[in-house]
Amino acid sequence: MQETLRGIVLRTVKYGDNSLIVDLFTESRGRQSFMTSTMRAKRSVRSVSFWQPLSMVEFSAETKPNAGKLPRPNDVRTYYNYTDLPFSPIKSTLALFLAEFLSAALREEKENQPLYRYIESSLQWLDMVESSAAIANFHLAFLMHLSRFMGIYPNLEINDNLNFKSQISNLKPQTYFDLLAGTYCDRQPDHSHFLKNQEAQALPILFRMDYPNMHLFRFSRKDRVRILQVLNEYYRLHVPNFPELKSLEVLQELYS
């Protein structure tokens, strides 16, 4: 049967001479793949312009396609038209990174309407925002709060019962945050995926950053790169088969 779907384009892969395989995160069915033509006819609903990464599209498709065949979208239209994101060098670089990141993070994501709405509203917010300070921190706030909707939000509460006292009285007590366990611990983990001291203690404050207040967080380029490295490592530890991202290095150089 035909069903009307809304989706956000994650990536496209060329298939043959005149087709694309399009991966979308849909509102009602999670991640889905579709086959579409690359014909560039004027007013064609199958125009390749609909399938740019992070485009928000609405279309109809067969929800139970024939075995071995990907469904083909029909009556395609964009339901949100970006006004600034494709034309701003900084925003478009962020979009390139976010599209690759979401394609990796949502590889096996099922229906999750709160997650869909979070991604949708976040991209619309990025499109409209004008503050350069807010834009500079957008990807950091986005990734931190994305983890909540994916069910991997870290436990940032420091248990008063944890023993942070050093065995040697003249040494300062140390705080450790175990990235693998996603929580604080009172001793250094037996693996390399952890933060300590100031970096560990800064996490609860850092995770208070959101879209309305992120222009107040002033980071150096070095700080911003380090935060992104930690967030990327956290997702690689908690999302199965999370790959190395090609656009990560490009994003790290954005504010150099």
Image: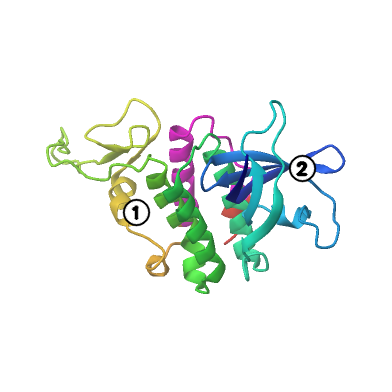
Relative vertical location of residue 52 with respect to residue 151 in this rendering, above or below: below
Badge 1 or badge 2: first in the primary sequence: 2
Q: Residue at x 53, y 34 (%)?
A: 108
Under circle 1, the secondary element is loop
Q: How many marks?
A: 2
The image quadrant of residue 223 is bottom left
User: Looking at the picture, does residue 93 appear above or below residue 129?
Assistant: above
Is the C terminus in the top left, top right, bottom left or bottom right quadrant? Answer: bottom right
Is residue 221 in sight in this rendering? no
Q: Main secondary structure of the magenta part?
A: helix
The amino acid at mark 1 is Phe
- Specify whether residue 93 is painted magenta: no
Q: Which residue is mark 2?
A: 20
Residue placed under numbered mark 1 in the picture: 207
Query: Which percent across, then down, holds residue 73?
Result: 70, 46
* Residue located at (30% from left, 56% from top): 205
Magenta stretch, residue numbers: 224-249
Labelled pair 1, 2 in contact (Cβ < 8 Å): no
Residue 120 versus residue 238: which sits nearer the camera?
120
Spatial CA distance of label 1 from label 2 is 38 Å
* Rendered position, 215 above or below 22: below
Q: Residues within 10 Å of mark 2 (few under 14, many from 20)?
A: some
Is residue 231 found inside the magenta-colored segment of the image?
yes
Left or right, 56 with respect to 156, comes to right
Vertical relation: 196 (above or below) 252:
above
Say left or right for 66 vs 114: right
Within-10-Å neighbours for mark 1: few <14, some 14–19, many 20+: some
Q: Which residue, as the protein is rendered here, is positioned at the far front?
A: 1
**Which type of secondary structure does the marked residue at label 2 adopt?**
strand
Specify the quadrant that holds the N terminus: top right
Query: The residue under label 2 is which amino acid type?
Result: Leu
